Image: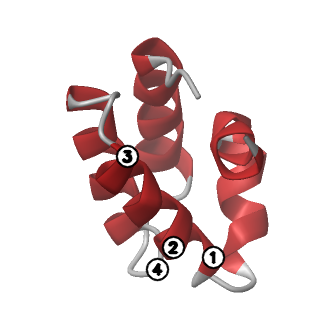
Amino acid sequence: MTVNPQHLETSVYMLRTHAQNAETTPLIELLEALQKDPDSAAALADVINTFNSLGSAQGLVLTYAPYVGTLITD
C-alpha cells in the first residue's frame, strides 16, 4: 500500500480541529509519525491497531478523517 502524506496531513488537521480528545490523541500522534515515515510498515500497523481499539470513537475519526478508513481497509 502507498500511504499519501498529504492525505495524512489533512486527516491530522481535521482530527486536531474537530475531534481531539483523550481517546483520539494517541491515534493522531501515530498518524503524524506515519506521515513522517509513510513507508514504515510498523507505523501503519500501529495506526491500524490503535484505530481498532477506539471502539465507538471510530465513527468520530472516520467522520473527520475518512482517509483513515482507506488505510485500515487496504
Residue 49 at x, y percent in the picture: 51, 73
Three-letter amino acid code at disc 3? Ala
- Mark 3 or 1: the one toward you: 3
Residue 29 at x, y percent in the picture: 27, 55
Q: Nearer the viewer, residue 28 or 70?
A: 70
Q: Residues within 10 Å of mark 4 (few under 14, many from 20)?
A: some
Q: Earlier in the sequence, mark 4 or mark 3?
A: 4
Three-letter amino acid code at disc 4? Glu
Residue 39 at x, y percent in the picture: 33, 29
- Mark 3 or 2: the one toward you: 3
Residue annotated with mark 4:
23
Q: How many marks?
A: 4
Residue 2 at x, y percent in the picture: 54, 21
For image coordinates 65% across by 57% down, the residue present is 61
SS for tag 3? Answer: helix
For image coordinates 30% across by 39% down, the residue present is 40
Residue annotated with mark 3:
41
| Measured Cα–Cα span from mark 3 to mark 2 | 12 Å
Where the C terminus falls, by quadrant? top right
Three-letter amino acid code at disc 1? Asn
**Which quadrant of the view contains residue 36?**
top left
Residue annotated with mark 1:
52
Q: Earlier in the sequence, mark 2 or mark 4?
A: 4
Q: Earlier in the sequence, mark 3 or mark 2?
A: 3
47 displayed left or right of 62: left
| Measured Cα–Cα span from mark 1 to mark 2 | 5 Å
31 displayed left or right of 67: left
Give the colour scheme of this rendering. Answer: secondary structure
| Measured Cα–Cα span from mark 1 to mark 4 | 12 Å
Up/down of 4 relative to 30, above or below: above
Where the N terminus falls, by quadrant? top right
For image coordinates 57% across by 84% down, the residue present is 53
